[in-house]
Amino acid sequence: MNYTFDFGWLIEYWPVLLKGIGITVELTLVGGVLGVALGIACAWARALGPGWLRPVVAAYVELIRNTPFLIQLFFIFFGLPALGLRMSELQAANLAMVVNLGAYGCEIIRAGIQATPKGQFEAGASLGMSRLQTFWYVVLIPALQRIWPALSSQIVIVMLGSAAVSQIAAEDLTFAANFIQSRTFRAFESYFVATLIYLALAIALRQLLRGLGWTLFPKRTAR
Amino acid sequence: MSDFTTWDILRNLLLAARWTVLLSLVSFIGGGIVGALLLFARTAKGKAGPAFVKTYVELFQGTPLLMQLFLAFFGLGLFGIDVPAWLAASVALILWSAAFLTEIWRGCVESIARGQWEASASLGMGYVQQMRHVVLPQALRIAVPPTVGFSVQVVKGTALTSIIGFVELSKAGTVVTNATFEPFKVYGLVALIYFCLCWPLSKSSQILERKLNVAHRNH
């Protein structure tokens, strides 16, 4: 192997990387928050919603979980304009991430909801709580607490999966690495640095979500 | 410019889907073999083996598959060999699958009660014998549903290999779109083919879980 590694380009190109990191973080933040919200709504619809809504949500979840994120992204960005739905690269990337996390989140949260004993619903009703109040305070919060670790890893998976949005020219971290390697011809080094940054982001996000779990669910139930 | 019928599009996509299936099989089987080797290192006594596998899993689960594909593609090139896309794709997907499979299987091995290890040790069995005769037969039963479930991730993971230029279903979708200017129809069909590949796997994973878990269901 007669190859000398060269990371000298970092001096000139670090602002490009920084901008890419910013976009990736932004995508993850918006995708994470809205995706979890969509997941909660879908989990409610599947477990307790009206009869006609359940198969619709089930079909959505199965469809998303059994197709690659890349194709979902292409369908939204290239396919939907045929229906008159035109959006920017970042909007398409965000939408794809929300739709993707929504489906996985639905399954995870539903599992948490189904683990709630039936007596809890009845106890909520006997306290004079409305159905929505019972769902929110009695069912959902403990369910979220139960499945928080699984939901956290799914959010990390979505963050890592967002590398694919560079393919519709959304200017995320991977896009930055592509740009740098096309300028410097240091392909391996560019992707190597980007990979390390992704690793750091994944570790940081995991810690952040763990901390968030502690804040959101302060020893509500002794487990 | 010639016109493309829906059948023309579908035929081209299905022909390309063969490569998706082949790459999935290679990745899954190769990943299984590497994953099994890693599993032995992970559950063995001593410190170096488990520490190595832990780091390995952390690296592959903490970075995007797309980056792993890029690094395999350009990294193998550093050795002065001309790397075809299929080789880089297979190498990256095998290593990636191995990380996930070894982690799934570790959970299954660790779910076997400690007493089983101690009982077999008291019968004078060595590590390999314990694994072969006591732990694996029980762990395999638990391992089947999540392993089948992971195969869905492998099939979906192959879509990313289109980005380093491997011509499979997703790449064919892009090529056909560029020829027909009908992205809605083409990507819809691509998604449908992926769904037809993945859904039976997802479903059988669920059914297997229900069937094989009967012995453990006591509530």
Image (spheres, rainbow, N blue to C red):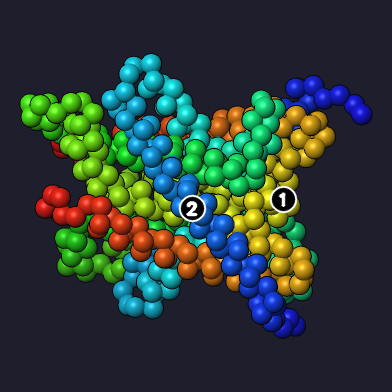
Residue A197, horizontal then vertical, whole percent? 53, 68
Discs 1 and 2 carry the same chain letter: no
Q: Residues within 10 Å of mark 1 (few under 14, many from 20)?
A: many
**Residue beneath the point at 23% across and 28% down:** A132
Which of the labelled discs sits on residue A101, or is there none?
A: none
Assign the N terminus of chain A to one quadrant of the image: bottom right
Residue A192 in view in this figure? no
Please identify, in this view, whether the residue under mark 1 or under mark 2 is nearer the observer: 2
**Residue beneath the point at 31% across and 57% down:** A212
Which residue in the structure is indicated by mark 1?
Answer: B166
Left or right for B90, reference A105:
right
Q: Amino acid at mark 1?
A: Phe
Which residue in the structure is indicated by mark 2?
Answer: A28
The answer to whether mark 1 and mark 2 are in CB contact below 8 A is no
Quadrant for residue A193, please give it: bottom right
Residue B65, horizontal then vertical, whole percent? 56, 56
Q: Dot 2 lies on which element?
A: helix
Q: Amino acid at mark 2?
A: Thr
Quadrant for residue B191, please give it: top right
Between marks 1 and 2, how big is the CA–CA gap? 28 Å
Residue A223, horizontal then vertical, whole percent? 14, 53
Q: Dot 1 lies on which element?
A: loop
